[in-house]
Image: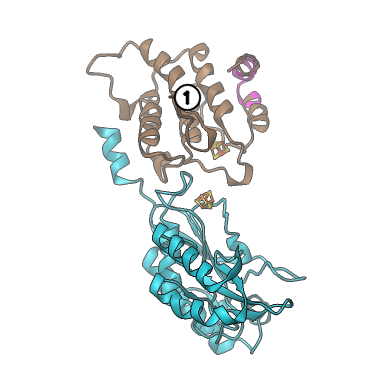
Chain colours: A brown, B cyan
Amino acid sequence: MRYAGPAGMDLEKMAVPLENICSQCDYKGTPDCREPECLMGFARRVLSYAVQKGLLDVPGASSLIPKGDFKHYYPEALVPALAETCRQCKECRDNHTPDCVVALVRSSVEYTVLSDSIPYPGSVFMYLARIKEQNPELAALLAGELSKKG
Amino acid sequence: MGDGIFRQKNGMVAIDIVASCGVMTPEQLSGLARLSEECGVFRIKLSTRQTLVAVLDEKGAGRLVESLPGLGLKVSPYGNVVRAVKACAGSSALCPRAVGEALALGIEIQDKYLGMEVPKDFKIAVAGCLRGCTDPYCADLGIVSSGREVFDVSIGGFGGSSKPLHGEVVARRIKREDVFLLIDHVLNRFRALGEPGEKLGRAITRLGLTPFLPPAGVKEAQQAPPDDFVKFLED
Ligand code: SF4
Ligand code: SF4
């Protein structure tokens, strides 16, 4: 039997592209792979914790995002991860919180490609518009990925 | 203070029954169902304040009322008192969106303040996240979890009126114990300054927020991620 995540969110689906990114990382399986200090590792831990506890928000967790991780990731690998956060996002608009599990994954991925995380406007459409302002190539890749079937 | 027992237009009697912010054990629910059958209850309605309204003929009403305490239930106080507290499902067991244990707080607040006399009915709403499923800004006093053990508090709202008002936030991210200090303070000020029959929101419009602001000592708390999350991250 397969269970959907709480409130219809499929958190495990968000984990798949993150695992793909990890599998391509040079540090994978070495002592230098330290998940709490790695943006992808952090995002994966947030997801496992949330699945285990049945949570959609981890209050205060956004303060722990390892912004000091400057490893290089290929945008082509990151885009499916970002796209999956767009698919799972409930577009809470005014009720968006940076400690939402989707937001934690999204911000972790963003830090790898953007100079700063984008304050999320609570809607995918407005989000794409903001990415386009900061990074038009990434926005084009993301729009292409989102037009594929999830 | 009055009791929530009302004569209906059809001659029947409606009894407003209060549980712990709408939470009942299966034993309470089945006990109430049996008692209702024995007392000839016609219908039971879930109210907007998370109470249960039992409608029945007058002859069975006395027995129903007398038997409620045996089930851990009671008739809800009515009139110019602190009313039944409306708390959302916000708890680790009942809502995955909950950022704090709002339901348990709501139950404790109800146990402490329900039925206390005030110049005009006083409604409290508690929500476990900023989605505010219990409409906290439409309550005389609204509480919203803003972290695991911290809450935002607004006062002076009321939704049920031809001129509704939204409450104003008077404290952000305060600790659980400070929520009680703040409620004590607001109720004391309301009793001292409110005119008979005046809603808190109207009293605030007349006097300004200052007399109702939190006492010194009620301060914003620092937000820290859950300890078990930090441990999970590091393991
Ligand atoms: S809008 Fe924000 S809070 Fe809502 S699901 Fe998306 S990321 Fe989470
Ligand atoms: S206010 Fe938040 S915690 Fe409470 S029931 Fe609604 S979504 Fe859940």
| Secondary element at image label 1 | helix
Is residue B211 something that shows in the picture?
A: no
- For residue A4, above or below residue B90: above
Residue kind at label 1, given as amino acid type? Met
Task: Please state if B224 lies on the left or on the right of A108 as rendered.
Answer: left
Where A67 falls versus B168 (above or below)?
above
* Left or right position of B73 against A120: left
Q: Position of residue B210 (x, y in %)?
A: 57, 77
In which quadrant of the rendered image does the N terminus of chain B lie?
A: bottom right
Q: Residue at x 46, y 36 (%)?
A: A101
User: Residue B166: within the magenta?
Assistant: no
Label 1 resides on the chain identified as A
Q: Quadrant of residue A123?
A: top right
- Residue B174 located left or right of residue B153: left
Asked whether residue A36 is in view, the answer is yes
Residue at 68 percent of width and 77 percent of height: B205
Q: Residue at x 49, y 31 (%)?
A: A107
Q: Magenta residues, as a range?
A: A132-144
Residue A79 higher or lower than B21, as above or below: above
Q: Position of residue A59 (x, y in %)?
A: 42, 46
| Circle count | 1
To which residue does mark 1 refer?
A14
Occupied quadrant, residue B6: bottom right
Residue A1 lies, in percent from the top left, at 43, 24
Looking at the image, in which quadrant does ligand 1 appear? top right
